[in-house]
Amino acid sequence: MESLTKLKQMARTIRCDIITTIYNTGSGHPGGSLSVTDILTVLYFNQMNIDPKNPNKKDRDRFVLSKGHASPALYSTLARRGYFPIEELAKFRKINGLEGHPDMRETPGVDMSTGSLGQGISAAGGMAMAGKLDNLPYRVYTVIGDGEAQEGQVWEAAMTAGHHKLDNLCVIVDYNKIQSDGFVRKIKTLDPLGAKFRAFGFAVITIDGNDIAEIIKALNKAKATKGKPTAIIANTIKGKGVSYMENEKGWHGVAPNAEQYDQAMKELGCHKKGRK
Amino acid sequence: MKDEKIATREAYSKTLIKLGKKHQNIVSLEADLGGSTQSAKFGAEFPDRYFNMGIAEQDMFSAAAGMATCGKIPFVSTFAMFAAGRPYDQVRNSICYPRLNVKICASHAGITAEENGPTHQMIEDFSLMRTLPNMTVCSTADFTSTAWLVEEILKIDGPVYFRISKIPIPLIYDENQKFEIGKGIQFGDGRDATVIATGVMLAEALQAKEILEKKGIDIRVIDIHTIKPIDRKIIIKAAKETKKLITIEDHNIIGGLGSAVCEVVSEEYPTKVVRMGINDQFGKSGNMRALMEYFHLTAKDIAKTVREIL
């Protein structure tokens, strides 16, 4: 898929899937799923060298959702990309369905099990190191949350990536400014975030992380950068696309009620099949 | 048991180098203790496949998991304290939950950390590691069994946690000894009592057996080199035939070998079990011999305990 219009349409479809999935299950994390949607759309429909029919291909690009709680966004993206049927989304967070956080043994297309924050970025680093060792051309992408960057392990991993000059690794920070308990800058500020990554040996690109054209441009630049890993500081809006969720700290891990669901679907312009 | 003593970390590095030549996908990760665990010897042989991750154990264990998803077989080594304690969450969620093929080599376990004292004496690792689903937990007693183990665990497609020792310990087994994961090894057919030992404590148990023999007491000794899955059969047989069990381990008496043995007999054949080990307290600085005396873990202490329960 190439055209911007089509990518934007896909991002909208995925947002609709996210809202429907969380609404149907009655739990999940809508805010951080909606903020990261455009990034996942570009990765899976424009950038990554992957084959949904052969999800474990050795030389495929890898993706690790280090902020594992945004699983509704990842599952919806994987389903739309053809890794498994859309109907599976109805089993989100249900016994023998899709786990609350990504599980690589249960769900096709999931490259690493995540959920405990800080660990995914290290695993992505390990994949990048293995790629270098095997002389394989694949790239490794990981998305971390902004609150997640308060984990010390993130900076251990950043130090490793800088030291080993992992130019096949791209760390994207979904910088939506809100964590579970409130605004990041009030709880424990990350700023200056770009300078921190630069100090650890990264090339840093700051973008509007909800702008598909900017995401594509940044990922292309990261791909062309040699001798160092890239960190993309993606300034995003938590709850993007649903007015009452946008920039509201109450929507980290809460499902919408029936009325809110209807409003969200309307605002997103979703083709609604009727709620349960 | 021979007079020759050798640290099991020697078996680790020697075997790992041998395996490294054969298996190109073996990699070794270390957190700035490569001289102590002797993984540095692998590094000298295979510099491209050796990653000193610096003093960053959380990153090291999750990165090893990432490598394992790409078909590598990471052997991750550091002190037991920093293998089972500090990165517990990483071992649990990055390695055990996705059942990734990472081998965790824990050196300086228990009071073998000696003069480094309580902060470095990991006496809870059996407890922490054996409660993790998908994990195999091993604790060998000499050079021969450790060399066997390091090679044998390649057959397991999943995580393994095993202890190696820094201190020289007696050579117990000869090269012809047969070992099997999950199968204990029995010394003698004694019927008076059974001493079930693991790791560095096996040598003491065997000495206790000799001491008691001179007094006409015939005990059997069992080496449990696999803490999980534990050999239920050999334990139940001993419970039935000797009626009295003593466990001895370089570990807190809570949660380790003693607890595992109690779990087995309480379900299948309730039997009195005396648990010897560190009695729910932290360690102390001192040399191994002094510490063993302080915590009552010597052959004499074992022999005394046996006589008390007879």
Image (cartoon, rainbow, N blue to C red):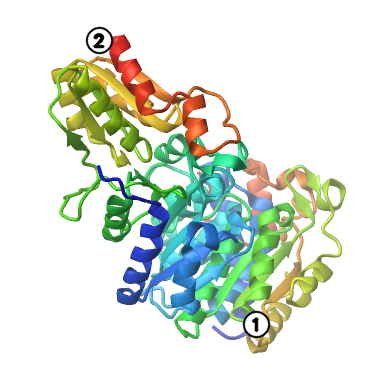
User: Label 2: how many residues lie within 10 Å, few (<14), some (14-19) or many (20+)?
Assistant: few
Residue B40, percent from left and from top = 50, 67
- What residue did someone put label 1 on? A4
Q: Which residue is the site of mark 2?
A: B310
- Amino acid type at circle 1 is Leu
Up-down relation of residue B121 to residue A222 (above or below): above
Q: Residue at x 18, y 31 (%)?
A: B234
The mark found on residue A110 in the picture is none
Task: Locate residue B117, reporting x and y percent.
Answer: 61, 38
- As shown in the figure, which amino acid type bears the numbered disc 2? Leu
Residue B83 placement (x, y as % from top left): 52, 49
Left or right placement of residue B303 versus residue B177 in this view: right
Residue drawn at (71%, 60%), measured in percent from left and top?
Answer: A241
Residue B95 vs residue A119: left or right? left
B117 up-or-down from B248: above or below:
below
Local SS, label 2: loop
Residue B160, image x, y percentages: 37, 51
Q: Chain of mark 2?
A: B
